Each structure stands twice: as structure tokens, then as C-alpha cells.
Image: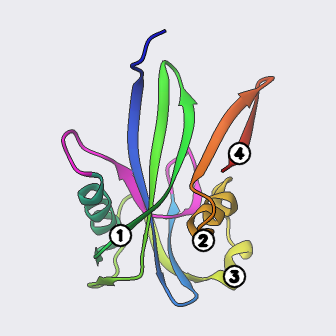
Amino acid sequence: MRKLENIELTVLCMVYHKNLILLQNRIKKDWQGYTFPGGHVERNESFVDAVKREVKEETGLDIMNPILCGIKQFPIEQGRYIVLLFKTNQFHGSLSSSQEGEMKWVDRNDLLSLNLVEDFMELLEVFDNDNLQEFQYIIQNDEWIVKLK
């Protein structure tokens, strides 16, 4: 059995302040809708540096002390796509948007009125619940199923 596999590494970050969550109205065709800022980890880049860089690029904010709070994963052709989930309420700077999409502070009570990405609520559950660390898609009978662990 081969012990190595192809991995695509990315990060997402929940930046929050009290009951507000910073979300991006993602415009790319894949995974369109409101979600957390993030993106790909560059070669030889630390995961913490990657999440700080991605949040800065997409929001204009400098975040401090991002906490790793979970992992999202799903199969891709010849490998696995891994998303490291971080959160922080420590930031400074001026909010701005990027070509990835418009940034917006959203009250948690208003989440369901937005066009959220398909798996947003399950992702939020991992961010919020200290007893959950993993969001995994598995494929059974050609159907994608979410497992939270």
C-alpha cells in the first residue's frame, strides 16, 4: 500500500467580534456564496503564516494569534484536499474586499438569510464546537456525505 498521496493544502479563518463573523461573498463558480476568507498554502509556507497572509489579502486585516480549531477534508482525483480551520478575534486594520469577493461583517442571527456556501453551517459547527475537530466528506454510492468528528 502506498503511504504517500497527493495533497492540496488550504486554510480558512473565522474572524469574529462578539456576535459578528467576517464573511466573503465568494464569486468563483466553485463553492459560490458567503464563506470564510482563506486560500492555498504556498510551498514551504507555515500554516499560520498562510492564514495570516490569506486573511490580509482578502480582507485587508492583520490577524493575530489564529487558533487551529479543526480540519476539513475531501477526496480529489489521486489524493486529498485538506483545509486547516483557524479562528481569531484579534485583528487590526481597515476592512477591504478583494477580487475573490466582497467582505462583510454578518450577525450570526442573520446567517440563514444569506446565500451561504453549501456546507457553511456544518463548517460553522466545527469552528464553534470544541468537541468537533474534523469535517470530512466521504463518497458512498456516488453521494457526498458529511461526517463531523
Identity, as a three-letter code, of the amino acid under mark 4: Lys
- Circle 4 sits on which residue? 147
In whole angstroms, how far apart are the C-alphas of marks 1 and 4?
A: 24 Å
Q: Residue furthest bottom?
A: 18
- Circle 1 sits on which residue? 66
Closer to the observer: label 3 or label 2? Answer: 2
- Span of residues in magenta: 27-46
N-term-proximal mark, 3 vs 1: 1
Q: Quadrant of residue 35?
A: bottom right
Q: Secondary structure at mark 1?
A: loop
In whole angstroms, how far apart are the C-alphas of marks 4 and 3?
A: 25 Å
Q: In the image, what residue occupies the spot 21% across and 47% down? A: 45
Taking the image as shown, residue 70 lies to the left or right of residue 10, namely right
In whole angstroms, how far apart are the C-alphas of marks 4 and 2?
A: 16 Å
N-term-proximal mark, 4 vs 2: 2
* Of the pair 14 and 70, the residue shown nearer to us: 70
- Circle 3 sits on which residue? 110
CB contact under 8 Å: marks 1 and 4: no
In whole angstroms, how far apart are the C-alphas of marks 3 and 2?
A: 17 Å
- Circle 2 sits on which residue? 128
